Amino acid sequence: MPLGNLIAVDWGTTNARAFRLDAGGSVVERREVQQGIMNVPEKRFDKAFLAMLGEWYRPGVEVLMSGMIGSRQGWVEARYAECPASAGDLAEGLASVPEFGNVRIVPGIHYCSSRGRHDVIRGEEVQIFGALPEGDSGRHVFCLPGTHSKWALVEDGRVVRFATAVTGEVFRAVEKHTILGALLADPELDPGEAGRNGFREGLERAREPGGVLNHLFSARADGLFSAVPAAGLRDYLSGILIGNELKEMIALYEADEVAVIGAKALNARYLEGLAAWGVKAHGLDVDTVTVRGQVRIARALGI
């Protein structure tokens, strides 16, 4: 079946994005709805699905979905593939949606360390394979920043291990629910140069001894004594958290080069941080690699 009959859907916790593709796998049209799996009324994913795709969905169209829609809280659970995992392994593990025979969901990937520590990714695996050059057999380190940042090592075209850092979630928790957030400026205000300087100072703070728990408190203490201007405190806190994530993950993966996959603004922060650590890095657009990854899995499936 030509790719012109393929729709790629990335359905996460907070929103869903759908892409209608042409025969060459390029995006003809894009749609996004602020209706992630946690805010679909009565869990009626079938209704949300049809409302999102509208006239796109017709007989003969194949739909490939990835993300939290395949989680235990989603529409149909797509069980995890095991590391090391290739795009072909994901294609073999696709879960079908009973009500819609031509709608399938990509499984996530499960990793268990030699010490019995578990980690999972769901959705990011598609982006990783979309970023990986076709037929590449080298070693690559990927960073996928976000609420739960993922760092993955790919060798010989397979994800061999990965690790999660809850950086974005911790930032929001500190901001909203701790005394550390009391001095932060209104997020709607543009911090300007104070914000840029604050982020750099946060990155530098992360390089100092003491660890992240000690570093975090400086967002209050340095704010009280104006060592960091109030307008720059939010970015300072961001720099501390991102800086500590980078420090640990660069060491964990012995990374001297990293591909960063995410939204433009967040990519910029991680690229700046990686440059500060002397690591070569480049950013990739999340939509672009999501579609490429879906196409790669579809081709492995024979679509």
Image: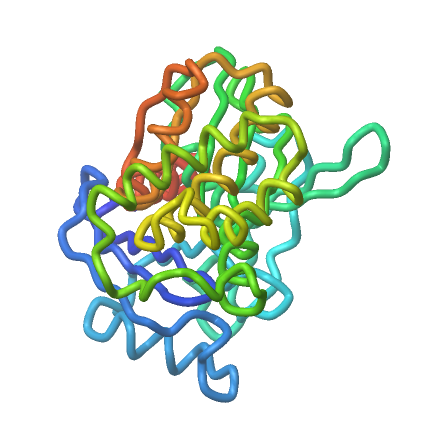
**Residue drawn at (47%, 58%) of the image:** 104
As rendered, which of 226 and 45 lies closer to the eye? 226
**In which image quadrant can residue 244 be found?**
top right
**Residue 58 at x, y percent in the picture:** 26, 69
Give the farthest residue toward the right.
Answer: 115
Left/right of residue 213 with respect to residue 138 in the rendered view = right
Q: Is residue 282 above or below residue 108?
A: above
As rendered, which of 230 and 281 lies closer to the eye? 230
Give the farthest residue toward the left.
Answer: 28
**In which image quadrant can residue 76 be found?**
bottom right
Q: Is residue 297 above or below residue 250?
A: below
Q: Is residue 301 above or below residue 113?
A: below
As rendered, which of 38 and 44 lies closer to the eye? 38
Give the farthest residue toward the front.
Answer: 225
In the picture, the quarter occupied by the C terminus is: top left
**Residue drawn at (59%, 61%) of the image:** 71
- Res 121 visible: yes
**Residue 219 at x, y percent in the picture:** 50, 49
- Res 108 visible: no
Give the farthest residue toward the bottom.
Answer: 42
Left/right of residue 184 with respect to residue 77 in the rendered view = left
Left/right of residue 175 with respect to residue 273 in the rendered view = right
Query: What colour scheme has been applied to the protein in the rendered image?
Result: rainbow
**Residue 140 at x, y percent in the picture:** 48, 18
**Residue 207 at x, y percent in the picture:** 54, 25
**Residue drawn at (52%, 16%) of the image:** 255
For the image shown, how many numbered marks are present on the structure? 0
